[in-house]
Image (cartoon, grey):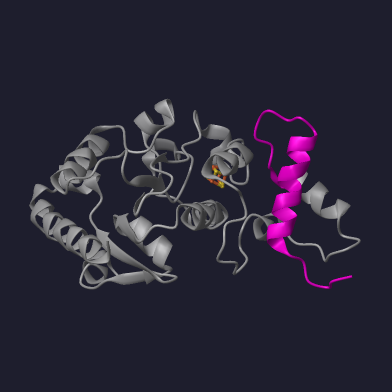
Amino acid sequence: MSDTINLQDLLRRAFQSQIELGMNECVISPENLKNKTLAIQSEAQVVTPQQALGNSQETTAAFPSLEAHKDAICNCQLCPLGKTRNKFVYGVGNPNADILFIGEAPGADEDRLGEPFVGRAGQLLDKILAAIQMSRQTVYIANILKCRPPQNRDPQPDEMELCFPYLYEQVHLIKPKLICTLGRIASQALLKTTTPLGKLRNNWQFFEDIPVIVTYHPAALLRFPSYKRDTWEDMKKLKAKYESMI
Ligand code: SF4
């Protein structure tokens, strides 16, 4: 008997058990993960739901596809936002995208439609993508949080910590060549830093071994149009780096 649990194996088993039970809706929750964990603790030490959902140092995906991952987590109630959301907002785009854009959290329009960046900020993001000959069909777009914080308040640290393993799994499934974080909150959360956005923008950052470019959130560009020039410089850097990699 192994005295250390293989977290990926635990997730696969949890997911497999959903399939075996013929569950058509997403069912991973703190309760059922805990029960699943208890059921197998005879052969592995107990882990928390949070650990089981991806806090391991594994660098490969635990789920076979984005779709399977989404199906498994879309009824998540790990944090209080699960109760107040309208729609779970997983992500959109090419599942094999070379570039992954990461924002902060769904807003009112996203919460209503279940897709990230569909409001005014999203329309601006579409224009930014078009300017570098890309689109939401060729890249992938996700958020740190999958559910909308009420009144569009900032995500709380504990909410981001609970939700982060989902993004982590998305990164490992998509395997992007480059990541672009949109805004301070997404950038600091992904990079686990408190360094101001202005400083992060100065250099390429890294998430694991993936180069990360930090830029402004499109919503900030709507409020402060003077940021558009810097954002355009960031996008040119992103495009040049990508072209040097393909
Ligand atoms: S924000 Fe993330 S952790 Fe919180 S309920 Fe939604 S999916 Fe779960």
Give how far across and how far down residue 99 sits, in percent.
33, 54
Indicate the quadrant where residue 152 lies.
top left
Which residue lies at the image location 59% right of the left edge and 41% below the top edge?
68
Instruction: Say left or right for 134 vs 160.
Output: left
Question: Residue 33 placed where, x, y %?
Answer: 75, 48
Which region of the structure is painted magenta? 1-30
Q: Quadrant of the N terminus?
A: bottom right
Which residue occupies 23% across, 42% down?
125
Position of the C terminus, as image quadrant, is: bottom left
Q: Is residue 55 magenta?
A: no
Ligand 1: which quarter?
top right
Residue 181 in the image: above or below residue 146:
below
Give x and y (percent) for residue 126. 22, 39
Residue 16 figure quarter = top right
Residue 183 seen: yes
Question: Which residue extends farthest front?
Answer: 246
Q: Nearer the viewer, residue 122 or 93?
A: 93
- Determine whether, in the image, residue 165 is placed left or right of residue 121: right
Q: 6 or 81: which is nearer to us?
A: 6
In the rendered structure, the answer to whether residue 45 lies left or right of residue 86 reads: right
- 132 left or right of 119 in image: left
Residue drawn at x 32%, y 46% is 139
